[in-house]
Amino acid sequence: MALVPSPQWLDSGNNAWQLAAATFVGLQSIPGLTVLYGGIVKKKWAINSAFMAFYAFASVLVVWILFDYNMAFGPQWFPFLGTPGLATSATFTTGQAIIPAAASGMPPLTFPMATLIFFQFVFAAITVIILAGSVLGRMNFTAWMIFCPVWMTLVYTVGAFSIWGGGWLAAMGVADWNGFNGGDPYFANANAGAAVLNTNTCTAVALLVWTLMDKMAYGKPSVLGAVNGMIAGLVAITPGAGYVDGVGAIIIGIVAGIIPWLAMNKLQKASFMMKVDDTLSVLSTHGVAGLTGGLLTGILANPAMLLYIGTDKEAPGVNVTGLLYGNAPQLLLQAEGAAFIIVYNVIMTFIILKVISFIVPLRMDEATLKVGDDAVHGETAYAIGVEGE
């Protein structure tokens, strides 16, 4: 009896690429952001900051496979939400991947659901870990334990389904693939290669521009500034990585090195912002950068950057055309999509935090803030092998 390793619909190259692309993003969280957070905060918060990152990663994965994946990418329940359901059965995870509400806009996928579930999970997880950057050394760890799975379920899934799962924003024509790693075309095709190149180009430009801004403003180049520029570039290119050409990536990189820099160094230091306790200026490097990139996609998206190639005149291919190439409404669509995501996230996040505050304090007390890790976890960073010193 002859055996084959996989069904005919599975393309091993596409499956390998999706798994590799997903793993790269996973590594940005564990150990990437875990090490970054633990390495740039004060020593007394190294354990707490790293712990917040990998707790988020673990807790999000659990709720993701229990019900959140299908809320974000499953069959439509509402125009903004998929139907909750387990993503655990052998039949489901080894069957052919499909995003039901978005299937008409893409070729049949050639890898299993397990690959798609994991690929989308790593973006979900890194989003929560990024949020941690704004509350490091501030937030009560118990409150964080509650916040991560609740926010993922009530906030992230709505935005994910609305844009990437085939929901109402996608139907309107809002353009945002949810990643910058080349895996979002779902095929190891030419657009995937372009997305990887654009991502690195934009990030490099943003790093250099941010460094120049630091040099001009403060007289010294800053390594933390360079890291912030790199992050801002990664965030800004995310919506348009596969939609803009090389010049577009450079332009986004320049803007990502200027606008978020101004937001961090001017706006967030203004007197009216003094009460906003944003540890790593996530508002600037992610919020402002993401909004900037999304809007610039509406301007710079090049119709020659085909996401999927058409086979005849009736199916010319799938692309996005920005304002620069004659499609002014795309910029308005990008703004409308951004407005919904911002407003919904702000309102729901406020509600979630308010409810959690009735259960446990959101912020650590002053005594704990003075001590740090030892008060929260009974442990101290960099302490192994230094007894008696």
Image: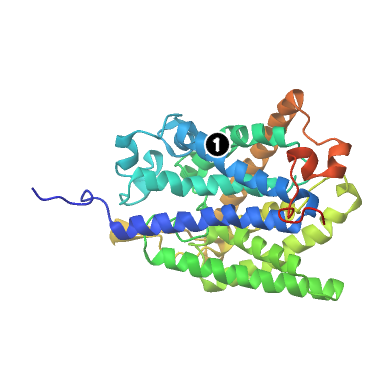
In this view, the residue farthest toward the left is: 1
Q: Which residue is mark 1?
A: 158
Relative image position of residue 75 (x, y in whole percent): 40, 34
Q: Residue at x 65, y 39 (%)?
A: 345
Relative image position of residue 115 (x, y in whole percent): 39, 48
Label 1 CA crowd tier, 10 Å (few <14, some 14–19, many 20+): many
Q: Is residue 354 visible?
A: yes
Question: In which quadrant will I find the C terminus?
Answer: bottom right
Q: Residue at x 67, y 64 (%)?
A: 256
- How many labels, in total? 1
In this view, the residue farthest toward the top is: 358
Direction from residue 72 to residue 347 in the image, left or right? right
In this view, the residue farthest toward the right is: 271
Direction from residue 364 to residue 82 in the image, left or right? left
Q: Residue at x 56, y 33 (%)?
A: 153
Which residue occupies the foreground of this view, 166 or 12? 12
Direction from residue 180 to residue 387 in the image, left or right? right
The secondary structure type at the circle numbered 1 is helix
Q: Amino acid at mark 1?
A: Val
Quick check: 356 above or below 342? above
Q: Quadrant of residue 315?
A: bottom left
